[in-house]
Amino acid sequence: MLTFLALAAVAFLGTVPQQSQSIVIYTGWERHALVGSDVRLSCSFFSWRWTSDDVTFSWTFRPDGSRDSISIFHYTGGAAYLDNKGPFRDRVEFVGNPARRDGSIVLKNLDFNDNGTFTCDAKNPPDIVGRPSSVRLLVFENVPIQAGVITGAIIGVVLGLLVLIVVIYYLMRFLVARRVFNLSVSKHGKKKKEGSQQRQGPAASAEPAKASSDKKKQESRKDKK
Amino acid sequence: MLLLLLGIVFLHVAALVLLFVSTITSVWTTGNIGTSDLWLNCTSAVGGPRCDPASAGEWIQAVQAVMILSIIFSCISLILFFCQLFTLQKGGRFFLTGIFQILAGLFVMCGGIIYTVMSPNWVPETESFGYSYILAWVAFPLALISGVIYVILRKRE
């Protein structure tokens, strides 16, 4: 029974339709960097096949406002080929690990002309059908604070303080009430031990006093109304 | 008694509505270029008004946060008022309600002050303050008076 199921599963996987065998490439959406700094553009892929020895990565660059792309990096046959004529001459470094499906590159000493879209295309023969993925590079003079970070921080801190104050208040009330309860319980226990004879005397005198004070309270309430 | 209650609630709700309008409409600055702050910069271009997100500077974000906090505190104060109306002992004061409303008023004041002092950094000289800014400054004394009334008021039957 089990062997039959295993054979059926293998047969099913073997007949998986062609669409699901396309390669899926992942890069980031956007990268922000300061002028003069380095940035790492990561690229990895998902493929149903094992990573072959002929895996290739290639990066192309399209400047902002231009329609042409130029190729700046290519990895094939186990060797990486870097840009030696274009705008990224001597500024590209391969830091990826093709065996681990990582085709990341590092761009050094960024300039404002490097603003643009970088496209990574990876192929894992025989799995070659897939869409290249793009990441946009934005080079800033100084890194701006994202909209809403400070807003959220201020609101969060103030509301957090409010919640903290409420929690502490109720905690204090609970603790104080518990302490008072423990004290009154211990007092009550001591009085019981001291003597049951004495209780009747003071109890008898306490009750009429209590009744009269209650009556007084009711009268004062009526007056106020 | 009922009249007093209605009047107080009306004052509170008026301050709250002013706060909402002042925070939501992005017209803290107006002029020839267009309107801007707190959330959008809108300019009247050829095809129609075009809006971009407001500049993400630290001070605008601080004003945004403070205005939102004032709305939150004023809403909490309104809810607390109705809670305390039914649960407070006779002769008690609406302390908590008043404190929250006064805090809301102080937050609006902070927002108005920050905007007044720091906006010349990013607003050109030709622009003037818009109606949202004015409403914020009107909401501040209303909220403060409302809060003080709550603190002074004693619950009567």
Image: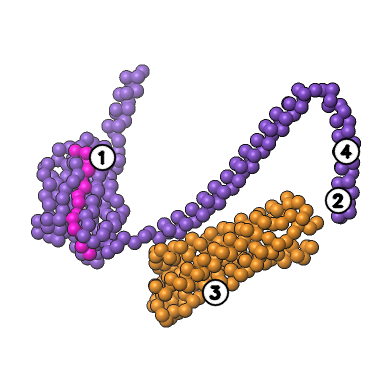
Kindly report which numbered mark, 3 or 2, lies closer to the viewer in this rendering. 2
Which chain does the purple colour mark? Answer: A
What mark, if any, has residue B154 been given in the picture?
none
Q: Chain of mark 3?
A: B
Foreground pick, A117 / B82: B82
Asked if badge 4 and badge 2 are on a common chain, one would say yes
Q: Chain of mark 2?
A: A
Q: Chain of mark 1?
A: A
Badge 2 amino acid: Arg
What mark, if any, has residue A209 been given in the picture?
4
The residue carrying mark 2 is: A221
Kindly report which numbered mark, 4 or 1, lies closer to the viewer in this rendering. 4
Cα–Cα gap, marks 3 and 2: 50 Å
Say if mark 4 contacts mark 2, CB within 8 Å: no
**Mark 3 Cα shell of 10 Å, populated few (<14), some (14-19), many (≥20):** some
Say if mark 1 contacts mark 2, CB within 8 Å: no
Kindly report which numbered mark, 4 or 3, lies closer to the viewer in this rendering. 4
Give the structural element (helix, strand or loop) at label 4.
helix
Horizontally, residue B48 falls left or right of residue A129, namely: right
Above or below — where is A93 with respect to A63?
above
Foreground pick, A184 / A14: A184
Horizontally, residue A138 falls left or right of residue B29, namely: left
Give the structural element (helix, strand or loop) at label 1.
loop
Which chain does the orange colour mark? Answer: B
Badge 3 amino acid: Ile
The tag earlier along the polypeptide, 1 or 2, is 1
Foreground pick, A102 / A158: A158
